[in-house]
Image (tube, helix red, strand yellow):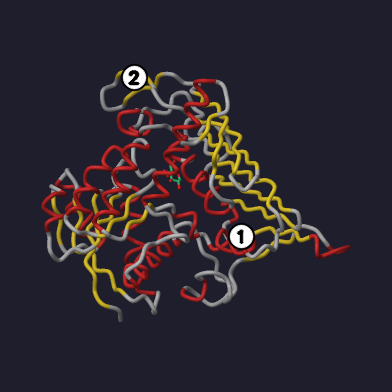
Amino acid sequence: MGRVIGVGLIGHGFMGRAHSLAWRNITLFTDSPLTPVLKAVAGRREDAVREFAVRFGFERYYTDYRLMIKDPGIEVIDNVTPNYMHKEPTIEAIEAGKHVIVEKPPALNAEEAYEMYKAAERAGVVNMVAFNYRFVPAIVLAKQLISSGRLGRIYHFRAFYLQQSLANPNAPLTWRLKREYAGFGTLADLGSHIIDLARYLIGEINEVNGVLYTFNRSRLNPATGLSEEVNVDEGFTAMVKFSNGATGILEASKLATGHFNSLIIEVNGSEGSIRFNLERVNELEVYLTSDGELSGFRRILVTQRTHPFIRFWWPPGHVLGWEHTFTHELYHFLTRLNEGRGVGPEAADFKDGWRVMSIIEAIAKSSREGDWVNVP
Ligand code: SOE
């Protein structure tokens, strides 16, 4: 068993549940150099945070995250709060010498993300933005195929992240639909994932031309019973140019009726293509021109011993799901922390987070100006 390391979680919503399960699952990764212990969770509502702590096995809870950050038994702070709570607590944790993980998008805007990146760099702590889709085994395999040159020169990247959660005009207002709390709408929530995957799989994006839209301009706030303005986007479409010459199309929408959580990716190269759809998370479709007269898209089931991460879980063929991606990324984080080096390029660090936020802002600017925009 690896050295024990104390973890403190800030926030206990949807992502708090996903990360807590993942931290506990590290126990299956027998070669993990560090063994995480759930020391504490912080949240403002005492009843809720106490109940969460008991349910997920945290040793204690705090109603003030600042006290938790001071806890000497905690070496890693994992911030899973809504976007507007990312910057301050994360920088405070960094300044207290903690290693940090923050949920995506890393901040409300590029300026905040830059401050976080610089603070982490100054303090020399290990930092990661939890872009979990980098840790889908099929995406890791796609990355291997692209990097090894099996697909040849990359021409195109296409990514669609589609949900239907806002398609009903009567769907209620949430924090994700308020600029003050979210920064951007679907562009930040879902768009950040595909921008990150575009950079991870293909390379840096240097020019964008996008359109943001909001069809439903007001929604009912269940807390107040009043109709309130929706001041962020419900989705976007963008053309992008990569610095290596590849071209891309990105689309994220929460108005895509019939799609619950479809993350669809296609890459075309001179010698092959790959296709992925999160709804079939264990599969990667691969086409190779070298197959000659037998060429055609083949469906690789990414559940063999040799496939990324599978050896830690079950015998070959026992499929993995969405929640496993969080365990993979935390395992990666702990491995790098133990080695005393950063999480890149396999995972996204705060510098990547800042780049993603810069691309988000460039897409929004391009939508306002109706033209191509260089990413600063
Ligand atoms: C909600 O739209 C959401 O949970 C996102 O916030 C996640 O990042 C994505 O993985 C699934 O959808």
The correct choice, above or below, for 317 with respect to 125 in the image is: below
Residue closer to the observer: 326 or 239: 239
Local secondary structure at mark 2: strand
Q: Quadrant of ligand 1?
A: top left
Local secondary structure at mark 1: helix
- Residue located beneath label 1 in the image: 142
Query: Which residue: 21% across, 66% down?
Result: 6
- Residue 278 is labelled as none
Label located before the other in sequence (1 or 2): 1
Which residue lies most toward the right here? 293
Picture quadrant where residue 125 is located: bottom left
Q: Are marks 1 and 2 in contact (CB under 8 Å)?
A: no
The correct choice, above or below, for 48 with respect to 329 in the image is: above
**As shown in the figure, which amino acid type bears the numbered disc 2?**
Glu
Position in image of residue 250 (x %, y %) = 58, 38
- Residue 228 is labelled as 2
Query: Which residue: 52% across, 20% down?
Result: 369
Query: Which residue: 82% across, 61% down?
Result: 295
Picture quadrant where residue 138 is located: bottom right
- On screen, residue 294 versus residue 355, left or right, reads right
The correct choice, above or below, for 161 with respect to 348 in the image is: above
**As shown in the figure, which amino acid type bears the numbered disc 1?**
Ala
